[in-house]
Amino acid sequence: MNKKQFTTEVLEAEKSLYHIAKSILKNDEDCADAIQNAVLHAFEKLHTLRNERYFKTWLTRILINECNHIIRSRKEQIPYEDYYEAQSVTQQENNPEVFEAVMELEDNYRIPFVLFYVEGFSIKEICQILKLSQGTVKTRLYRGRKLLKERLVGVYGYEK
């Protein structure tokens, strides 16, 4: 993969990378730092990419590692209320209850949920990204859906 292909692939994945970083870090500045570090790290280690077809999966794994590094190094999280207020008006207006319910899920459920339902990664790709077994990913998706359903009872006409 040459520099031009790398740039093109990164630009195509930019929105997806932001969503993934945001689901982990919840802070725009941290997201920008994580994405920048991930892209730089990926460019430096481009020679280790075995199959160009899996570039986005590979880059996503690097991004998640960068996000985890930021969390470990800062050890402080922005309060959820501040994060929610900082969200764009359109995100809050579209489905605020769903958005809030997804963001309140534990990391174990929220990250696979965002990767699968928002970003469209396959279960196999999520297994590679998160370094989990297929059964674990499926279980976390199932439990995440179940928790969301419990939180959204009554909001959209769901009933127990």
Image (spheres, rainbow, N blue to C red):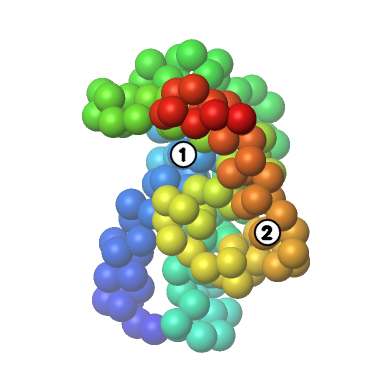
| Camera sees residue 142 | yes
Disc sitting over residue 137 in the figure? 2
Earlier in the chain: of badge 2 and badge 1, it is 1
Left or right: 75, with 49 as reference point = right
What crowding class fits label 2: few (fewer than 14 Cα within 10 Å), some (14-19), or many (20 or more)? many
Residue 5 against residue 144 in the figure, above or below: below
Left or right: 60, with 29 as reference point = right
SS label for mark 2: helix
Q: Name which residue type carries label 1.
A: Lys
Residue 119: percent from left, percent from top: 42, 56
Distance between mark 2 and mark 1 Cα atoms: 20 Å
Residue ID at (59%, 44%): 145
| Camera sees residue 36 | no
Disc sitting over residue 22 in the figure? 1
Residue 70: percent from left, percent from top: 60, 39
Residue ID at (33%, 70%): 9
Residue ID at (51%, 54%): 115
